[in-house]
Amino acid sequence: MNLEQFLKSMIDVRASDIFVIAGLPLTYQVDGRQVRSDAGPLMPADTEAMVRAIYEVAGRPFERFAELGNHDEDFSFALPGVGRFRANVFRQRGSLGAVVRVIPFGLPDPADFGIPEEVMRIARFQKGLVLVTGPAGAGKSTTLACVIDRLNRERSGHIITMEDPIEYVHRHGSCIVTQREIPTDVATYAEALRSAMREAPDVILLGEMRDPETISTAVTAAEMAQLIFSTLHTTGAAGTVDRIIDAFPPTQQRQIRMQLSMVLQAIVSQQLVPTVDGGVTPAFEIMVTNTAIRNLIREEKTHQMDSVIAAGGPEGMRTMDQSLFELVDAGRIARETALQYAIHLEALEQRLAVAGL
């Protein structure tokens, strides 16, 4: 079976990731479960051949990666009539390896991915900073693709996305959509963001806020009446705010704290949680910034944010632990699973016990 046939078969079984690693049979992931092929373990020569094939179908020069001695490289590619893929090629124990993420053609439907309307409401903001957070593979890119698609259908303006690499391709709808890939189209996120501010943007999707320079530029852009979406690898609104502040030296933290309190509009934190039927389902924490939240950020009292979120149901808010409790109550996930993914384990354990769950 050649690479194209294999990738097509992975889409047919709804695989999310494919692992090409020496010493391991070809392995793919479906609904959070790893499935190993019946073939024997791959040898270093096998993984190099597959990596070369990936570069060939992607139309990229493998020799450049090899000659420059790069330790890893991210890129996306498409196979006509099959799908799109995001590849990360790396070196490990003297051999080449790769993990390939499967991205089916077309844009995701929120209903198919369990994304509730409370999350989709973040598309209603006109300006400010909106963050979607969670661990790698939690579905952040999918959630943001749904939001951008809604904006592209319901609003007019200029949407600029900057991603590493581009996952979902958006056609021009009621908006003009410009998509730039890091580092193919522009060297860095910070450079792309500075450039975007000269391109009459209305909405900017910043794939990831990786460093203080990018965070600072994004916050400044949000102050200039742009709507900025971005991601962080954090869980929970309070932890996200703390991570942003801690990225700066102490002498700058007060300033960024004040700026963030003014421009932050919402934080959506998500995790993919195993279900009782062997699949996965997303669990969301939704924080919509109100006066109380802004004051807590300014006053360095982020540890109190969960209480405000828990009481903010009428405003569309919920904590991660509230979402996990609801999933247990609905019979979707096991009690033990909820506790494993809880932010405040003891509090959730007590609430489940009181409810007899």
Image: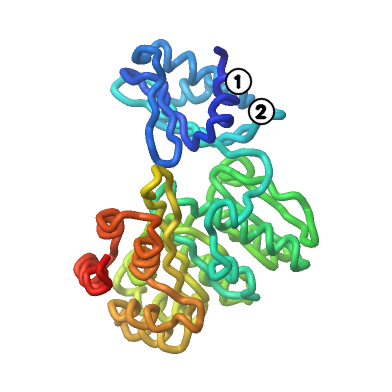
Badge 2 is on which residue? 79
**Could you tell whether 42 is left or right of 172 in the image?**
left
Q: Residue at x 58, y 67 (%)?
A: 117
How far apart in space, not on screen, are marks 1 and 2 (Cα)? 8 Å
- Mark 1 residue type: Glu
Q: What element carries label 2?
A: strand
Q: Which residue is drawn at 33% across and 68% down?
A: 321
Position of 144 relative to 154 (above/below)? above
> Which image quarter holds the C terminus?
bottom left
> Which image quarter holds the N terminus?
top right
Residue 260 vs residue 2, the one in the foreground: 2
**Could you tell whether 127 is left or right of 297 in the image?**
right
Where residue 150 appears, as percent x and y from the top left, is 68, 62
Residue 139 vs residue 52, the one in the foreground: 139
Callout 1: few (<14), some (14-19), or many (20+) C-alpha neighbours within 10 Å?
some
Q: Residue furthest front?
A: 356
Determine contact: label 1, label 2, CB under 8 Å: yes
Q: How many labels does the image show?
A: 2
Residue 59 vs residue 108, the one in the foreground: 108
| Colour scheme shown | rainbow
Q: What element carries label 1?
A: helix
Q: Is residue 301 visible?
A: yes
- Give the quarter of the image for residue 173: bottom right
- Give the quarter of the image for residue 255: bottom left
Badge 1 is on which residue? 4
Where residue 241 appears, as percent x and y from the top left, is 38, 70
Q: Which residue is drawn at 51% across and 36% down?
A: 101
Where residue 131 appears, as percent x and y from the top left, is 49, 65
- Mark 2 residue type: Leu
Where residue 61 appears, as percent x and y from the top left, is 58, 22
Q: Which residue is drawn at 77% across and 58% down?
A: 176
